[in-house]
Image (cartoon, rainbow, N blue to C red):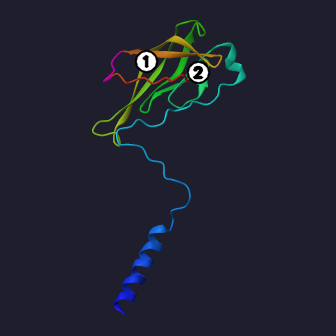
Amino acid sequence: MATTSRWLALLAALVIAGCGGGSEPETTRELGAPPEQFEPDEPDAALASTIAVVDIEGEPAAEPDSLQIASDASIEGVEWDDWGSDTTAGEGDFRLLVCEPNCAEGETESVAARIELSEVVECEGQRYYSEAELTADDLRRSPAIFIDPPC
């Protein structure tokens, strides 16, 4: 009787272990491995005749009013000079989340700023700015700036 109970327990454990397995393998990556490369949305036909910029949100745009340049930073109300040249600059309101005493309780700092876009690259027939530099007075810290052409 004890042997039968053991076999039934073993059989039940095997059935339970096999449940929920499905035929799809789980996606895993090694610790420390980078996440998959982000692919921005496809540019529309209106962008093909000019140079675009892709911010952290992945939307290609020409002369955008705002750029989300980091998860905690953006530049809003941008007015651009000479968009479409190899280097362009714009002035706007730089907004940065200041994590003091922590990010949940922090406030957004807002200062006048200038952003310069440069280093034009071509990807699949579309030109993109690939470098950015931000200058502003009275910043507590300079953020990392992410603009990400798809090539």
Residue 87, percent from left and from top? 52, 7
Q: Quadrant of the N terminus?
A: bottom left
Callouts 2 and 1 close, C-beta under 8 Å? no
Decide which of 66, 21 is in the foreground and name it: 21
Residue 49, percent from left and from top? 69, 13
Check residue 49 in the rendering and tell me which mark sits there, or answer none: none
Q: CA distance from mark 2 to mark 1?
A: 17 Å
Asked if residue 117 is among those painted magenta in the image, a careful observer would answer: no
Task: Establish if 33 lies above or below 79.
Answer: below
User: What secondary structure is marked by label 2?
Assistant: loop
Q: Residues within 10 Å of mark 2 (few under 14, many from 20)?
A: some
The residue lying furthest to the right in this view is: 45
Left-right relation of 89 to 30: right
Task: Establish if 36 lies above or below 15.
Answer: above
The residue lying furthest to the bottom in this view is: 1
Task: Establish if 101 lies above or below 21.
Answer: above
The residue lying furthest to the left in this view is: 101
Q: Which span of residues is magenta-colored?
A: 137-141
Name the residue at 42% across, 83% down.
8
Residue 96, percent from left and from top? 40, 28
Residue 64, percent from left and from top? 58, 21
- The chief SS type of the magenta part is loop
Name the residue at 50% across, 17% down.
130
Q: Residues within 10 Å of mark 1 (few under 14, many from 20)?
A: some
Location of residue 135 by image quarter: top left
Name the residue at 38% across, 43% down.
30
Name the residue carrying label 1: 112
Decide which of 98, 6 is in the foreground and name it: 6
Left-right relation of 9 to 43: left
Name the residue carrying label 2: 64
Q: Does label 2 or label 1 sit earlier along the sequence?
A: 2
